[in-house]
Image: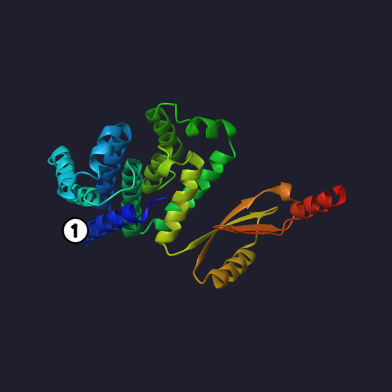
């Protein structure tokens, strides 16, 4: 989680970018996102650079100048301006710079999808791919192994999603392979789903049922949860016959578990006392 000071640096970079890319196309934003994420890769590979760019004994302008000297002429000027604005801020520890750079790249990718009108598709595709991974133990191990060469895992993702998902979805899954914000691959996908929903001003509700819900039931549940959380809710439904019946709903830290399995487990525990 970002500290308050790194959040301020992130906010300054976002404002700088927004001021310079108000009329940018979806393709232009996607290119900027790729450049920002390439710098995140550089920061991940070079801890010494992270330390130099977050050294509190150096003035912010000096740290920004160091980064500019490394990137000038190699990346678009708007990318360099945005990242030097980021580095001009303060960070509690060097790893925070990597985390917020990754977050910035992901946010720009979501802006590109929003501009292209595909943000809802990206949200749905990320969730469905996460379900595919969690339901296939071999695939989960292969993609989630941080010791495996990243290019090979990226190639596997591209083979699986080519022609089946939006370009922003594929790129965000690749971001997840690197361990977005220090998370595991599957946790990275979950967080990226939530960020995508937040970009659409929606709360994510993870719903587990024993049998598929009808369209009317889904709409009724979404409406009820929207009333509770005072904002639109995006349902992510998982069918799991093991719960026998009922429904489980998780929204953030809130869990509403009305499954028959939970009731049986509660009764079993009561008899065991």
Residue 148 appears left or right of 48: right
Residue, x 47% and y 45% (percent of image)?
189
Secondary structure under tag 1 reads helix
Residue, x 71% and y 48% (percent of image)?
241
From the viewer's perspective, is residue 51 above or below residue 25? above
Q: Tell me where residue 36 appears, x and y as whole percent.
A: 27, 45
Residue 221 appears left or right of 271: left
Question: Which residue lies under the disc numbered 1?
Answer: 20
Q: Tell me where residue 221 appears, x and y as whole percent.
A: 61, 66
Q: Tell me where residue 27 appears, x and y as whole percent.
A: 26, 51
Does residue 135 appear in the picture of this structure?
Answer: yes
Q: Tell me where residue 174 appears, x and y as whole percent.
A: 39, 39
Q: Nearer the viewer, residue 73 or 45?
A: 45
Does residue 75 appear in the picture of this structure?
Answer: no
What crowding class fits label 1: few (fewer than 14 Cα within 10 Å), some (14-19), or many (20 or more)? few
Q: Nearer the viewer, residue 24 or 147?
A: 147
Residue 226's quadrant in the figure?
bottom right
Residue 16's quadrant in the figure?
bottom left
Residue, x 15% and y 45% (percent of image)?
62
From the viewer's perspective, is residue 161 above or below residue 243? above
Residue, x 61% and y 63% (percent of image)?
218
């Amino acid at each position: 989680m970002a500290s308050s000071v790194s959040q301020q640096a992130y906010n300054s970079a976002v404002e700088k970018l927004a001021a310079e890319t108000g009329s940018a196309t979806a393709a232009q934003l996607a290119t900027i996102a790729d450049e920002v994420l390439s710098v995140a890769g550089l920061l991940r590979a070079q801890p010494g650079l992270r330390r130099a760019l977050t050294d509190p004994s150096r003035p912010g302008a000096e740290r920004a100048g160091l980064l500019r000297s490394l990137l000038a002429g190699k990346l678009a000027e708007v990318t360099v301006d945005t990242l030097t604005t980021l580095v001009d801020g303060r960070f509690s520890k060097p790893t925070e710079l990597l985390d917020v750079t990754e977050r910035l790249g992901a946010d720009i990718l979501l802006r590109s999808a929003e501009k292209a009108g595909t943000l809802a598709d990206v949200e749905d595709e990320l969730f469905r791919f996460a379900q595919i991974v969690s339901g296939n133990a071999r695939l989960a191990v292969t993609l989630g192994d941080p010791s495996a060469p990243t290019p090979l895992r990226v190639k596997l993702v591209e083979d699986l999603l080519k022609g089946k998902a939006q370009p922003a979805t594929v790129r965000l899954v690749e971001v997840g392979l690197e361990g977005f914000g220090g998370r595991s691959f599957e946790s990275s996908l979950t967080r990226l789903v939530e960020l995508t929903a937040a970009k659409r001003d929606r709360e994510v509700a993870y719903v587990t049922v024993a049998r598929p819900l009808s369209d009317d039931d889904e709409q009724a549940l979404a409406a009820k949860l929207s009333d509770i959380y005072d904002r639109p809710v995006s349902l992510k439904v998982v069918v799991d016959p093991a719960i026998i019946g009922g429904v489980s709903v998780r929204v953030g830290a809130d869990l509403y578990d009305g499954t028959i399995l939970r009731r049986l487990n509660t009764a079993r525990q009561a008899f065991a006392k």
